[in-house]
Structures are given as structure tokens and as C-alpha cells.
Amino acid sequence: MRAAIGQTLTSTVDATTVVVVRWPDADVDLTCGGAPMVDPKGPDAGATAELDPAQSAGTQLGKRYVVDGLDLELLCTKAGTGTLAANGTALEIKTAKPLPASD
């Protein structure tokens, strides 16, 4: 799938909703709880799927999710029980960069 910056994507297994902050210039298999995320205004809106128990770590409201090796960043606007994954790799919560030490 390809998504545009600012696009909203929803999960088909739970209430997780994310907004695309950065997306690589390539197709990405984005899943939540083991099922593909969909555009809530697209043809797959309203689809439902089963949650994979192995991918049920959950998402947190207001957190940014990233994955190493991909220029992908998502902002979670609704929390859920599924784990976000891109191309089979789980996304992690983005952490703040430490400030440089002052002398």
C-alpha cells in the first residue's frame, strides 16, 4: 500500500487509528494486529478481521510510531489492542532525542 502524508488509516481488528506523518517512497505492508490497515473512506472501509494474539501488544493514544530502516512515522489518534507492523516488523514508540550536554 502507499499512503499520503496526513492520510488517516484504521485497523480492521480494533479501534486503532493513525495519521501518516512520514511515508517512504515505496509500497509498505502496514498491519495492525496482523491484519492490513485500511483507508476509512476507501472501498475497504468497515472491513473486519481477526486479531492475531501474537500481535496484541496494543497502541497508545498520542504516541508516534516508527520502524528502523524505513522512513515511516505514524501518529496514533485512537488506541487499540493490536500491534502496528510494517513489512512484518513491529513499529516502536518514537523516543525523544537527548539534548546535547552543556558545559
Image (spheres, rainbow, N blue to C red):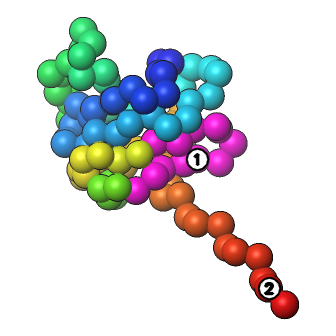
The x, y position of residue 101, in whole percent, is 78, 83
Quarter occupied by the C terminus: bottom right
Q: Residue reaching furthest right?
A: 103
Which disc number belongs to residue 5?
none
Q: Earlier in the sequence, mark 1 or mark 2?
A: 1
Circle 1 is placed at which residue position?
Answer: 67
Vertical relation: 56 (above or below) 4:
below
In the foreground, 84 or 75: 75
> On the image, numbered disc 2 is attached to which residue?
102
- Expressed as whole percent of the image width and height from the top left, the position of residue 99 reads 70, 74
Residue 11 showing in the rendered view: yes
At 46% from the left and 52% from the top, the residue drawn is 64
- Does 92 sit left or right of 39 as displayed? right
Q: Nearer the viewer, residue 81 or 42?
A: 42
- The region drawn magenta spans 63-74
Percent across and percent down for residue 47 are: 18, 21
